[in-house]
Amino acid sequence: MRTGRGMLIVASLSLAASVAGCGGSDGPADQAVSAPPGPPVVSGTSQPPAASTARPTAVTGSTGPSAGIPVTGAGGAGPACVSTGLAASLEDVQGAAGHVYGRIVLRNTGPGTCSVVGYPGVSVVNATGGQVGAAADRTGPAGTPVTLPPGGSTGATLAITQAGLLPGCEEPGQAVRGSNLRVYPPDDRGSLLAALPAGVETCRDPAVHQLAVGAFGQP
């Protein structure tokens, strides 16, 4: 009986030690589990720059010269020719099929080279300089710049329809003989006078368009 009781005590002690050993596996040393690494911290210098919210500035303005300002140079050599350095005349006058044709000629009377491009302004004036009828209409394509050395000249074609062929100008007293042509060089407010051939009558009514002029430098 003593031997059996001793064996029972030994077995009990062994079981207790075994249980204690199992309980030790839940200690703090076994519970320390490394946490999974978090997302990497991105430094401010490595972040992409924020998109700009500023809008592009709208560009406005005109692609040509301001209204009323003469075009300097006009694409040719030297500055634009102006009335103070020019002389005007009507040349090569001839009649055909109810019209009178001629060339408005501008001659450079200045000491330096200048350029002409575009259409002249042309109207008929009376002996006192007052305009008679409508100014000439522009006709044909725009010409190319013409460079005028001192003494050089260029011309633009002028067509004048006979007054009696136009409605509003057939009756006596509706037309009058003009004395001169008033010629404005392109982009110039100054004007020149060119003698008008005798016998050319001009409609008084400004609603009747009797004159047509081409550009300088037309082929």
Image (cartoon, grey):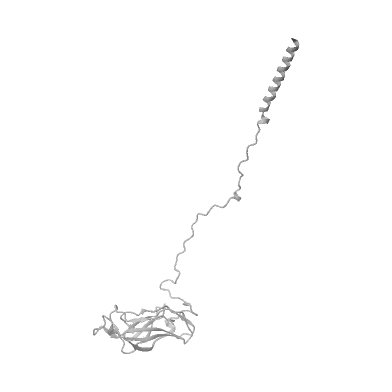
Residue extending farthest left: 172
All told, the count of numbered labels is 0
Q: Residue 159 falls in which quadrant of the image?
A: bottom left
In the displayed structure, would residue 128 be above or below residue 49?
A: below
Residue nearest the viewer, comparing 120 with 12: 12
Name the spot of residue 39 as percent of width and height, x first: 60, 43
106 left or right, relative to 124 = right
- Residue 57 location, x and y as percent? 48, 60
Q: Nearer the viewer, residue 95 or 82?
A: 95
In the displayed structure, 209 sits above or below 18; it is below
Q: Residue furthest top?
A: 1
**Observer-nearest of 179 and 55:** 55
Left or right: 162 in relation to 146 = left
Q: Position of residue 121 (x, y in %)?
A: 38, 80
The C terminus is located in which quarter? Answer: bottom left
Residue lying furthest right in this view?
Answer: 3
Viewer-closest of 210 and 82:
210
The answer to whether residue 7 is left or right of residue 149 is right
Percent of width and height locating residue 171? 24, 84
Figure quadrant of the N terminus: top right
Q: Residue at x 68, y 25 (%)?
A: 22
